[in-house]
Image (cartoon, coloured by chain):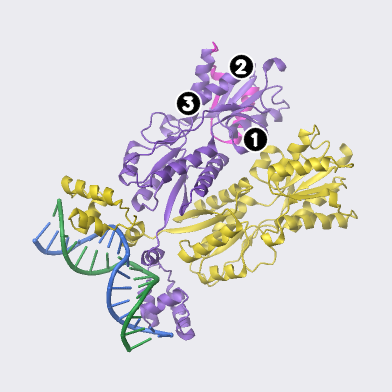
Chain colours: A purple, B yellow, C blue, D green
DNA sequence: CTGTTAGCGCCTTCAG
DNA sequence: CTGAAGGCGCTAACAG
């Protein structure tokens, strides 16, 4: 049992509680004999000192801010954001530590959040890619924990640092249309609205509205939703290629899926962008290396601004909620997976 | 001042300490009037409850294991390892949290470690890509903190989970030689031995010994060491290409640098692998997407094994130091950046 | 060298 | 509804 306390050890070893503390802290003023004895008892009782008590006693205060992350379908997006967080933290001379909470499902998220609220072991919280209910928002505010979301949700009452997904979807689609494409497919996730991650839906909405704006009617056969993973993106791309009239361009809702699309296209012996253009969304660092054309949503910067925002709220001026930082506008980063249709 | 205590608040608000605690915890049994008053005082005094004390009082024990990481030159290698750590943690039903310590320099590393040792706020430590002095090892052991390195150092007395770099260097070189290459360059870092990161040096040693084994004398002009960054790798590659007789293949000491090499080659209008083969080292997930031929060192798995190892040491059997887990052998992952010289 | 005594800052009964 | 008292588990003076 981890129940053993320093007093139990003292009793069992027939020494004073102070002595036990001394061996625990490696004080030189303990005879070898008693030290050995105490050490033995510690082993037997499987005693582990309670660090919380130690900190209290020593008047050491530890501050940490939590980062809570969703299931890792797209790890590099998280990694890019986390990198920003770390950089922001490093730039601010504080002694905050970073605690990583990873979550394996939505239900688990609620549990984790409840736990955090209970334990309050965190003086700030960065929430990556997850939405909060109004109740959770209230609870967080009640608890006085500064928090921010790293992503974008429309019309939320709490601070989210992210770029608008509808707008991003429009950008990508507009870009493809300007290149002369009209038969443009969309490959995205199929999370239902209840799932609480409207990102894909919004990007798709931007795609559709832009198509219509240019007089193109969105076609069901060109909109392929499904699980958010690489393999599945490939599968859906194959289906697209098998169409009587395949698309000339694909807008994938994330760089991660875009890579799946590209892999599928190449696997069929077709070329990107000569035969089909592909644009992603995220601008991961990875995408620089793969030469992917994409919409930059400033992942890393969002992390940096997020942590700085959180930190700024601890500066006493908690009454004056610091202005939510905002990201630069999104833009299409043109690389080598898209080209004008006339060039084909 | 964060010096204000609950007692100060009580005094200033002319209430009992218990009442303050109640408003802090949102207890319903506080009249609105006094609650407001107390809240006001809390604001004035800029009082922040001491979470350590709260935890102690509530008998909540928090366990966390620390992950300490080097300056981020190669973030994705860290990310891949971290992913393994998180996965391993998720597979083990415990309530451990992960605390991330990021370090900006070697000196900073020593400080951080000293701090961790002082505060002992961590019940396990995973050390990524950093070496320990014997003193640090002893201190960690004294403190009873289970720890492991994620990487490989030769002949250390502590547990490192990583694959042998000399061997890996040999593998890569052997692979290139089997492809018919004889004029093989090496692009790596120039960290001096004192820096405490022998990784590159070892990979280079493997490279040289394998060359010699095949009767090829390593040439200084083909060994290009320098800063560990993408741009610099490009620069060195340009120098290589400017040689009267350029190499037909490059062994880059990491995938990250390999991508720099490839970028340089392509920028010169040459093709990979048709004109020059490039092999990296790491097998980042990124490398799957870029089609890079590389040596797999099981980054993600190392994280997973590392955390499981640490956790296993808390299972009471601390006396019996759990066997250090070992990684599967390294191997060359053949993709699309290398080819036989005769095919050129 | 070692036992004892105070707290660390907060939560939680327990009487009012 | 509210104040006072005890204790969480440990460290840090103190006397021996």
**Host chain of mark 3:** A
Q: Which segment did they paint magenta?
A: A214-241
Residue furthest top in the image: A215
The number of callouts visible is: 3
In front: A6, or B193?
Answer: B193
Closer to the camera, B211 or A208?
B211
Using residue B185 as the reference point, say whether residue A49 is left or right of it: left
Rounded to the nearest whole Å, what is the CA distance between mark 2 and mark 1?
22 Å
**Under tag 1, what secondary structure?**
helix
The residue indicated by pointer 3 is: A202
Q: Position of residue A232 (x, y in %)?
A: 59, 33
**Mark 2 = which residue?**
A178
The chain that hosts pointer 2 is A
Q: Are marks 3 and 1 on the same chain?
A: yes
Q: Quadrant of the N terminus of chain B?
A: bottom left
Q: Residue at x 62, y 59 (%)?
A: B130
Q: Is residue A3 above or below residue A213?
A: below
Look at the image and tell me whether residue B118 can be seen. yes
Label 3 sits on a secondary structure element that is helix
The residue at 48%/22% (across/down) is A205
Q: Dot 1: few (<14), some (14–19), or many (≥20) neighbours within 10 Å?
A: some
Q: Which residue is mark 1?
A: A288
- The residue nearer to you, when weighing A295 against B226, is B226
Give neighbour class at mark 3: few <14, some 14-19, many 20+ (Cα, 10 Å).
many
Quadrant hosting residue B321? bottom right
Chain of the residue on which disc 1 is drawn: A
Q: CA distance from mark 2 to mark 3?
A: 21 Å
| Residue at x 53%, y 43% (from the top left corner) | A84
x, y (%) of residue B128?
60, 56
Residue at left offset 60%, top offset 54%: B70
């Amino acid at each position: 049992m981890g129940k053993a306390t320093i007093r139990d050890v003292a009793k069992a070893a027939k020494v004073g509680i102070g002595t036990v503390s001394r061996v625990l802290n490696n004080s030189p003023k303990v005879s070898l004999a008693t030290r050995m004895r105490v050490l033995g008892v510690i082993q037997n009782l499987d005693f582990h000192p309670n660090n919380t008590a130690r900190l209290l006693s020593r008047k050491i205060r530890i501050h940490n801010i939590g980062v809570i992350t969703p299931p890792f379908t797209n790890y590099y997006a998280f990694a890019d954001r986390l990198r920003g967080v770390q950089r922001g933290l490093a730039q601010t001379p504080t002694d905050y530590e970073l605690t990583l909470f990873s979550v394996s499902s939505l239900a688990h998220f609620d549990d984790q959040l409840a736990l955090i609220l209970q334990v309050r072991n965190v003086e700030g919280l960065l929430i990556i890619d997850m939405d909060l209910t109004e109740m959770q928002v209230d609870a967080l505010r009640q608890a006085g924990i500064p928090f921010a979301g790293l992503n974008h949700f429309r019309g939320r009452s709490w601070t989210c640092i992210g770029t608008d997904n509808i707008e991003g979807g429009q950008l990508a689609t507009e870009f493809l249309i300007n290149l002369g494409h009209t038969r443009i497919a969309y490959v995205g996730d199929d999370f239902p609205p209840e799932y609480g991650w409207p990102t894909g839906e919004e990007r798709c909405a931007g795609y559709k509205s832009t198509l219509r704006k240019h007089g193109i009617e969105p076609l069901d056969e060109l909109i392929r939703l499904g699980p958010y993973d690489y393999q599945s993106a490939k599968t859906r791309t194959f289906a697209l290629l098998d169409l009587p009239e395949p698309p000339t361009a694909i807008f994938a809702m994330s760089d991660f899926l875009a890579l799946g699309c590209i892999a599928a296209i190449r696997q069929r012996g077709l070329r990107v962008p000569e035969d089909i253009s592909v644009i992603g969304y995220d601008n991961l660092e990875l995408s620089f290396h793969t030469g992917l054309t994409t919409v930059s949503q400033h992942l890393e910067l969002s992390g940096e601004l997020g942590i700085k925002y959180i930190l700024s709220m601890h500066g006493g001026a908690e009454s004056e909620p610091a202005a939510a930082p905002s990201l630069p506008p999104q833009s299409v980063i043109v690389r080598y997976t898209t080209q004008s249709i006339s060039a084909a």
